[in-house]
Image (tube, coloured by chain):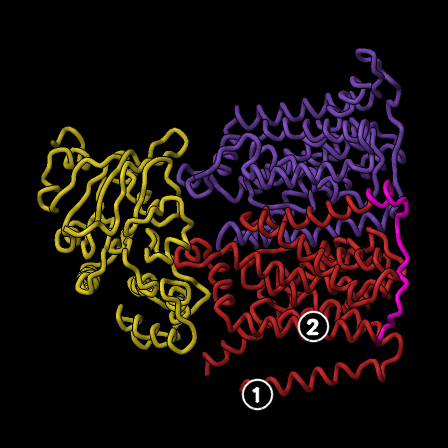
């Protein structure tokens, strides 16, 4: 597709999506928010983890930092300032974590990021219990569901734009080289630490803002809600199902899985985790390349046969 | 107070060491990072609970039933579910990531089954819960018994791995899976064996822990994390490292809970873990591989 | 006499109790091709890894054009104009041929991007004999073509010093002749090359000078023919009985 056409198609899609709150009922809007939330998270996840192949389970650490910052600061200042502070906190944590951990490879990185979210949750819990003596906070801000939806849409557009720009840039190539062979990357002049930390921080910024924007949805937040590790895994499985080799790949995982989880939770609330686990295993075993990779391989196969 | 804290720290640490030995066998030999490890442990704890409360089976007798069952189940899991991943993985990193994802799915399935059967409530039963006096401190008899059994099982495993032919094969695969076939070792079969042993060990840990701790269907993940911490602290594949690291973790947790704040034990656990990963990713006793 | 491009003195590197490189010194003049020889495990590849920054020396200095690079990160050394190939060929598997070379161009000494970079990538691919293969997936390349692509990626850095780690190993006789011709043509452009090699034909026909290592130490230095007939060199390769 020509760039102009692609841009026009994207503009029409965004305009259409922006109109959703105008004609959707409360349930549909709530579903649209969930979809948009996971779209932002899965796209942000694959910005970093897609090309570099570092599997991160820190998604909810940043999401929770954003949500909790809002819970602490709500009513104390104007909304944009709250978002900025949340972003600053998330970015600071991402830089510290990135600089100290991105030399860990493979399984150690996965486990570290998992432990990180848990550690932050424990510390916040302890702080709230012992210092502020209020575990759990009410979020009262003057933001309704439509506002949340539009802000998430804005974040999604920004995340896609960032993804497109990075893919065309030198940095994008650097990340793909790192994903293929980090030793070679270093020996052809790529500052691998800089590239990885920059993308990790960018990805974490989107996750943090996403958590901040989502916070008013709950009205009540405690660390167990804000730092729920299941979110990290859901984002991971959605991105994997869609496929991380393309920027729009995660979208193909978000939509079916959000709908599936919604359905399972409504129909089989008592067997939800069994079914989620089975869905997860099915994806890992049957479509390891993701839906997009799978479709591309079939298309290539047909072209090859013709 | 100090003696009591040390005693309960050692008991807890002994359990951690036992389940971590299971994980280190699975990860060090079979190259499977098994995130469902803790779930199997809790399943074993529930089995012991069920045997004790509904069939009046002594948990020590329960060990004889649960541990072989866990061995068989783990062996089947490796053969049926993990072998395809081993076959398709182009390299070790890919296998590790694949195995994390697959066992994560298993974690949810096992946890979901336990939730469906037992709900989210905490369970415990009373077995040999009378106090014993040691050096001025009182420790429950069931804890001492658990520690004794853990030590015996750990020692047995160590002797098995160092003194027998099959054990030597297991260690050979851990050191160099590519060269092991050259001396006629069937790597897949050995990996399946190691994985099954790992499952048996964690099930033994689950039965022993059920004698003195309350547990529910959701806490398996916590034990998986602790086992991972111990494995990495001790150095992957290093059984003695597991023992020392497990005891250290148990003592640190007990000390933090006793003298600082019980609310910070998990935070302390993770903090130790993160520091170890950053400072000595090869483990306390490992040597840097170039 | 001009100053050396690469000057190594007293270089030592240990792995635990093993001394992989033991007090090695050498100097490479601009435009010179030097061979680094020795039995397996004698420390040749470790020397290359130390020069390219993959490893840091325990003792000793490595100077490139008078600047100390012994403690620099590999990407900095690469940007100063030191390019390398790997003992086991390392292609970037998910990138096509053009992108493999672009990766070298985009981050090298005078980093290019965009149209100019693409053109240079085509030129370099043609230079190593892969003209017209820019869009080919690396999985479809033969072994020698992979080696060519790896060389193109190294040349993409516009290096002052090229480190070839057994780049000619594993080629059949006709491919070997092509490979030797390719390296020789680089010398025509004035490139300085340090090559680790076992193929004696290649060493004799390419190298101005050779260094022979054994057990981490330099045991001989000089013109290829002279060095290869020294008693200590023969002993290192064949053992005491044959010397």
Residue C98 place in picture, x, y as percent:
38, 71
Give the extent of the magenta segment.
A126-146
Does the stretch in magenta take in B134?
A: no
Residue B184: quarter of image: top left
Query: What is the crowding at mark 2: few (fewer than 14 residues within 10 Å), some, or many (at least 20)?
Result: many
Is disc 2 in contact with disc 1, using a CB cutoff of under 8 Å?
A: no
Is C115 rendered above or below residue B101? below
Q: Residue at x 79, y 62 (%)?
A: A82
Q: Is mark 2 on a helix, strand or loop?
A: helix
Residue A271: quarter of image: bottom right
- Judging depth in this view, the residue of C179 and B84 nearest the camera is C179
- Judging depth in this view, the residue of B102 and B7 nearest the camera is B7
Q: Mark 1 points at which residue?
A: A4
C-alpha gap between disc 2 and disc 1: 20 Å
Chain in purple colour: B
Does residue C149 appear to the left or right of A158 in the view shown? Answer: left
Does residue C184 appear to the left or right of C59 in the view shown? Answer: left
Query: What is the crowding at mark 1: few (fewer than 14 residues within 10 Å), some, or many (at least 20)?
Result: few
Does the stretch in magenta take in A133?
A: yes
Q: What element carries label 1?
A: helix
Q: Residue at x 75, y 71 (%)?
A: A152
Is A179 rendered above or below residue A118? below
Residue B161 place in picture, x, y as percent:
55, 28
- Judging depth in this view, the residue of C156 and B127 nearest the camera is C156
Chain in yellow colour: C
Of callouts 2 and 1, which one flags the residue occurring earlier in the amino acid sequence? 1
Q: Name the residue under label 2.
A: A156
Q: Mark 2 lies on which chain?
A: A
Chain in red colour: A
Residue C97 place in picture, x, y as percent:
38, 70
């Amino acid at each position: 597709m020509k760039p102009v056409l692609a841009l026009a198609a994207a503009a029409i899609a965004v305009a259409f999506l922006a109109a959703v709150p105008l004609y959707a009922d409360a349930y549909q809007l709530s579903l649209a928010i969930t979809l948009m939330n996971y779209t932002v998270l899965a796209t942000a996840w694959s910005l970093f983890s897609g090309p570099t192949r570092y599997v991160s389970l820190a998604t909810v650490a940043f999401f929770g930092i954003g949500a909790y910052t809002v819970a602490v600061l709500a009513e104390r200042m104007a909304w944009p300032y709250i978002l900025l502070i949340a972003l600053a906190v998330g970015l600071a944590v991402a830089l510290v974590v990135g600089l100290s951990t991105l030399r860990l490879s493979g399984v150690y990185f996965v486990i570290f990021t998992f432990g990180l979210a848990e550690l932050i949750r424990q510390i916040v819990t302890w702080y709230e219990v012992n210092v502020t003596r209020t575990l759990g906070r009410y979020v009262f801000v003057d933001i309704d569901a439509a506002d949340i939806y539009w802000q998430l849409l804005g974040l999604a557009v920004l995340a896609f734009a960032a993804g497109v720009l990075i893919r065309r840039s030198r940095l994008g190539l650097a990340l793909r080289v790192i994903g293929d062979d980090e030793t070679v990357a270093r020996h052809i002049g790529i500052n691998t630490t800089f590239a990885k930390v920059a993308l990790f921080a960018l990805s974490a910024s989107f996750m943090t803002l996403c958590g901040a924007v989502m916070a008013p949805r709950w009205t009540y937040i405690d660390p167990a809600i804000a730092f729920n590790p299941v979110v990290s895994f859901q984002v991971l499985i959605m991105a994997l199902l869609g496929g991380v080799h393309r920027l729009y790949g995660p979208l193909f995982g978000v939509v079916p899985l959000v709908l599936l989880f919604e359905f399972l939770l409504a129909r089989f609330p008592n067997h939800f985790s069994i079914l989620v686990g089975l869905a997860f295993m099915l994806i890992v075993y049957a479509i390891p390349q993701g839906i997009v990779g799978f479709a591309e391989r079939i298309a290539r196969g047909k072209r090859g046969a013709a | 107070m100090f003696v009591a804290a040390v005693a309960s720290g050692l008991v807890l640490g002994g359990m951690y060491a036992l389940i971590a030995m299971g994980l280190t066998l699975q990860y060090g030999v079979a190259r499977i990072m098994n995130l469902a490890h803790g779930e199997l442990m809790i399943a074993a704890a529930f089995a012991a609970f069920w045997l004790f409360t509904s069939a009046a089976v002594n948990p020590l007798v329960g060990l004889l039933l649960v541990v072989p069952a866990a061995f068989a189940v783990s062996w089947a899991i490796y053969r049926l579910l993990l072998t395809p991943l081993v076959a398709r993985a182009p390299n070790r990193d890919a296998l590790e990531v694949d195995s994390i994802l697959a066992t994560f799915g298993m974690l949810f399935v096992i946890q979901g089954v336990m939730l469906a059967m037992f709900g989210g409530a905490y369970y415990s039963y009373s077995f040999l819960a009378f106090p014993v006096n040691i050096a001025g401190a009182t420790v429950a008899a069931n804890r001492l018994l658990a520690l004794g059994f853990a030590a015996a099982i750990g020692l047995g495993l160590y002797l098995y791995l160092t003194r027998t032919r099959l054990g030597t094969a297991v260690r050979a695969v851990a050191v160099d899976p590519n060269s092991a076939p050259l001396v006629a070792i069937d790597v897949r079969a050995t990996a399946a064996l190691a994985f099954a042993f790992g499952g048996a060990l964690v099930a033994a840990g689950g039965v022993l822990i059920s004698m003195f701790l309350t547990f529910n269907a959701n806490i398996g993940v916590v034990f998986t994390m602790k086992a991972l911490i111990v494995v990495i602290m001790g150095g992957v594949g290093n059984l003695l490292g597991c023992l020392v690291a497990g005891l250290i973790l148990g003592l640190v947790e007990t000390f933090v809970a006793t003298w600082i704040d019980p609310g910070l034990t998990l935070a302390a656990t993770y903090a130790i873990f993160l520091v170890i990963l950053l400072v000595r990713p090869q483990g306390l006793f490992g040597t840097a591989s170039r | 006499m001009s100053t050396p491009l690469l000057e190594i003195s007293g270089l030592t590197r240990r792995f635990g109790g093993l001394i992989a490189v033991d007090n090695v010194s050498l100097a490479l003049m601009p435009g010179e091709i030097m061979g680094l020889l020795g039995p397996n495990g004698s420390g040749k590849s470790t020397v290359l890894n130390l020069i390219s920054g993959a490893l840091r020396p325990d003792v000793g200095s490595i100077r490139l054009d008078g600047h100390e690079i012994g403690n620099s990160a590999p990407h900095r050394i690469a940007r100063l104009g030191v390019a390398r190939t790997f003992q086991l060929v390392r292609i970037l598997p998910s990138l096509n041929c053009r992108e493999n070379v672009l990766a070298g161009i985009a981050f090298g000494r005078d980093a290019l991007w965009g149209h100019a970079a693409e053109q240079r990538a085509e030129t370099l691919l043609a230079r190593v004999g892969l003209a017209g293969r820019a869009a080919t997936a690396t999985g479809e390349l033969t072994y020698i073509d992979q080696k060519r692509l790896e060389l193109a990626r190294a040349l993409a850095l516009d290096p002052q010093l090229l480190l070839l780690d057994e780049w000619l190993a594993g080629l059949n006789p006709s491919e070997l002749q092509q490979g030797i011709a390719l390296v020789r043509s680089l010398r025509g452009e004035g490139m300085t090359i340090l090559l680790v090699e076992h193929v004696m034909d290649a060493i004799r026909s390419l190298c101005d000078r050779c260094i022979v290592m054994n057990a981490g130490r330099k045991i001989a230095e000089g013109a290829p023919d002279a060095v290869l007939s020294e008693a200590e060199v023969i002993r290192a390769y064949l053992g005491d009985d044959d010397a």
